[in-house]
Amino acid sequence: MLRRIAIVGASLAGLRAAETLRARGFDGELTIIGDEPHRPYDRPPLSKQVLQGTLAPEQALFHRKDGYDALALDMRLGVRATSVDLRVRRVTLADGTWADYDRLIIATGARARTLPGIAPRAGLFVLRGLDDAIALRRELMNAPRVAIVGAGFIGLEVAASCRARGLHVTVIEALPVPLSPILAPTLCGMVAAMHRDHGVDLRTGVTVTDVLGEARVAGVALSDGSRISADVVVVGIGVTPNTEWLEPTGLTLDNGIVCDGAGQAAPGVYAAGDVARVANRWHGDSPRIEHWTNAVEQGVHAAENALAGPGASTSFSSVPYFWSDQYDRRIQFIGLARRHDEMVIVDGSLADRRLTALFRRGDRVVACLAVNQPRALIKYRKLVAACASWEAALSGTAAS
Amino acid sequence: MKVVVDLNQCDLHGLCVEAAPEVFEIGDDGALHVLNETPEQGLRAKVDKAVRECPTGAISIEE
């Protein structure tokens, strides 16, 4: 008989877990702990509508039609969980209070990496949380020149948002093209061209060696000897999972919390979202995935299995999906392009920046990318999920 | 159950079409269509999935 469930992490995965527990009839004590003072909010708009000024920051808070009362949560916000005792089943918080549990769901997410050896100062930002977005948006009102370190999705979305505000934007990327760990080279080239056409000064194959300015940023120095003047510097070079507080527990921590297919890290302990490495049947591995949809799926999955118990748990199987909005283009991606053997554009063209591309590994289709073609993604999603034969994917015949 | 989509919120991610193809479709016009506004209870789990996976929160269920 479960009486108490604690969720550590009050973002998307934690919220969906809480909602699922209640929807499945759990009527015991449900505690949700978040280190930020805010109610759960949605991150995708932060780098886009919130920075562009078309969405007020508070509108990024998740709107629950029934409000939070219906969930009957013991919501502890603005206080960090500092440790967990797996034996007595107790989470201790930074303010000295605690929450006892019969089942624990850990969804503490990840934090933005910063430039190593660079001290914080005014005008130097990362963009991860709502407070980051609020502060950055305020600064952009008086910052005509922005330098962005890292041409990943966050960096590129911030670049597009800053261009929408009419700011002068420089993006610095260590690799030869943007997004290269994720996409095929020709597609990365298309993204680079898109940003340059929108007026971004994109510098690739160079690294930032120093941030200039003492009390406040004045620019960045690059490995090719050049200097870029900037009023604001935004660093988007990836994230680190928030697992340090779990180090004394004996849970397996290796770039995230390592879990079995049930999402379980130890008896009665589950993990979900950006912090978790859940064994994924479709994937054949235990990847750590930082996508929105993954947080939803794993939050729901952890909650269901926490209620079902080990004897009745289901194993996780999901095809990774993400999207990115930049300018008037939506990039959608499903599957896994890593180590693909071939990429073929099956509809549209690079020149139009409107296309559908399929990725082959061996004789199977393993991923699909669509730029401004949402219907194509729906069609190929089924084929990717089924790891259909490449032949079938190219003909589109197994799509029904 | 009655399925309601706020088309001003809909951003055409298509996750609902994957979750519940019996209920949602993106048509030739490129817009989202609700094929069945009052699906039978047997489709409840699928529609619930569509609701919670919608990135813009555009879908709701009225009992």
Image (spheres, coloured by chain):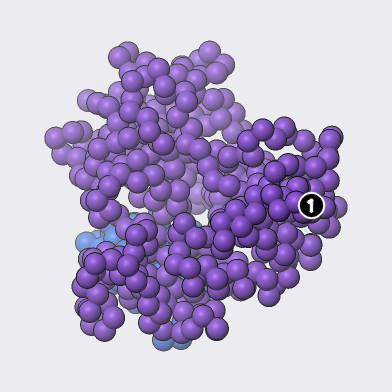
Chain colours: A purple, B blue
Residue A247 percent location from the top left of the image: 41, 22
Q: Is residue A283 above or below residue A29?
A: below
Q: Amino acid at mark 1?
A: Arg
Mark 1 lies on residue: A227
Q: Residues within 10 Å of mark 1 (few under 14, many from 20)?
A: some
Which residue is pictured at 47% across the width and 23% down the height? A245
**Quarter of the rendering containing residue A305:** top left
Residue A159 visible in image:
no
Seen from the viewer's position, the closer of residues A212 and A386 is A212
Which residue is pictured at 27% across the width and 43% down the height? A279
Q: How many marks?
A: 1
Seen from the viewer's position, the closer of residues B8 and A231 is A231
In the visual, does A355 lie left or right of A380? Answer: right
In the visual, does A204 lie left or right of B32? Answer: right
Residue A123 visible in image:
yes
Q: Quadrant of the C terminus of chain A?
A: bottom left
In the visual, does A207 lie left or right of A9? Answer: right
Seen from the viewer's position, the closer of residues A219 and A161 is A219
**Quarter of the rendering containing residue B46:** bottom left
Residue A365 percent location from the top left of the image: 28, 69
Callout 1 secondary element? strand
The residue marked by circle 1 belongs to what chain? A
Residue A290 percent location from the top left of the image: 45, 48
Residue A283 percent location from the top left of the image: 28, 53
